[in-house]
Image (tube, rainbow, N blue to C red):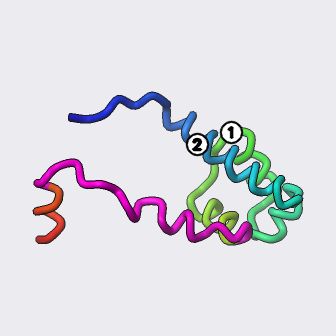
Amino acid sequence: MEGFIWETAEELDLKLAQRVRNIRKRRSISQEKLASMSGVSYGSVKRFESTGQISLLSLTKIAMALDIADELRNIFSQVPYRDIKEVINETR
């Protein structure tokens, strides 16, 4: 049985953007500096933090610049099985 989704994709994107923004601010990095460090345009960094919209490649570049690429790399590494059928399918 599928679980309930309590937030939209847009809300989830905004939460991710807020977490990245908090890390950036905690490290005293301006949006302009993050853009320079990551190779992502200033406009894209600004738009990401305000809307949550960004390409996966840009998100990866930002994560690398903030030294949080491991968290991105591990995002789906420990997904629990939903049922025995998934366990069987994975071994095929």
Q: Main secondary structure of the magenta part?
A: loop
| Mark 2 or mark 1, earlier in chain | 2
Q: What stretch is highlighted in magenta?
A: 65-85
Any magenta on residue 79? Answer: yes
Image spot of residue 47 (x, y percent): 74, 45
Circle 2: element type: helix
Image spot of residue 11 (x, y percent): 57, 34
Q: What residue type is labelled 1?
A: Thr
The quarter holding residue 65 reads bottom right
Q: Which of the pair 5/81 is nearer the observer? A: 81
**Which residue is disc 1 drawn over?**
51
Q: Residue at position x 40%, y 31% from top?
A: 5
Considering the image in quadrants, where does the N terminus appear? top left
Q: Which amino acid does label 2 sit on?
A: Asp
Circle 1: element type: helix
Considering the image in quadrants, where does the C terminus appear? bottom left
Q: Is residue 35 left or right of residue 61?
A: right
Image spot of residue 55 (x, y percent): 59, 56
Q: Residue at position x 65%, y 67% from top?
A: 68
Q: Is residue 17 left or right of residue 6?
A: right
Q: Compared with residue 26, is residue 90 higher up or lower down, i.e. above or below?
A: below
Q: Residue at position x 63%, y 52% from top?
A: 54
